[in-house]
Amino acid sequence: MSKRDSFTIRKKILSSLKESSFSFAQLERKINTNSQTIKDSCNELKYYGLVDIVEKIHPSNGRKYYKVSITENGRKVINQ
């Protein structure tokens, strides 16, 4: 099994977010990579204005989690 490059992972994140918004943990399972890679990639995509990351509180257990959604610029990039 070969290591995937960061471009491929970021592209998969944007493609997944076209469907719906996801938490870091959901993206981790969907893309099949570790949580630190997802967080780093999402933060970089946020820096370039391709995704939004919103901090939320889970209603049943009170824990913080982050919801990632694609922006209009992100949709334009992934549709090219």
Image (tube, rainbow, N blue to C red):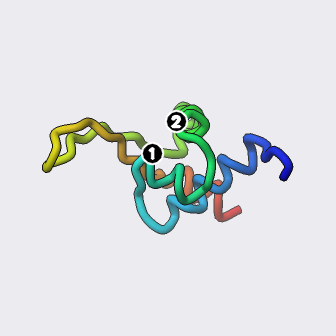
Q: Residue at x 45, y 54 (%)?
A: 26
Q: Residue 36 at what x, y percent from top left?
A: 56, 33
What amino acid type is highlighted by mark number 1? Phe
Q: Residue 79 at what x, y percent from top left?
A: 65, 64
**Which secondary structure lies at badge 1?**
helix
Q: Residue 48 at what x, y percent from top left?
A: 58, 35
Q: Which residue is mark 2?
A: 39
Q: Residue 14 at what x, y percent from top left?
A: 58, 55
Residue 60: which numbered mark, if any? none
Q: Residue at x 67, y 53 (%)?
A: 11
Q: Residue at x 41, y 57 (%)?
A: 21
**Which secondary structure lies at badge 2?**
helix
Q: Which residue is mark 1?
A: 24
Does 12 appear above or below 33? below
User: Which residue lies most toward the front here?
Assistant: 1
Does 22 appear above or below 62? below
Observer-nearest of 62 and 5: 62
What amino acid type is highlighted by mark number 2? Lys
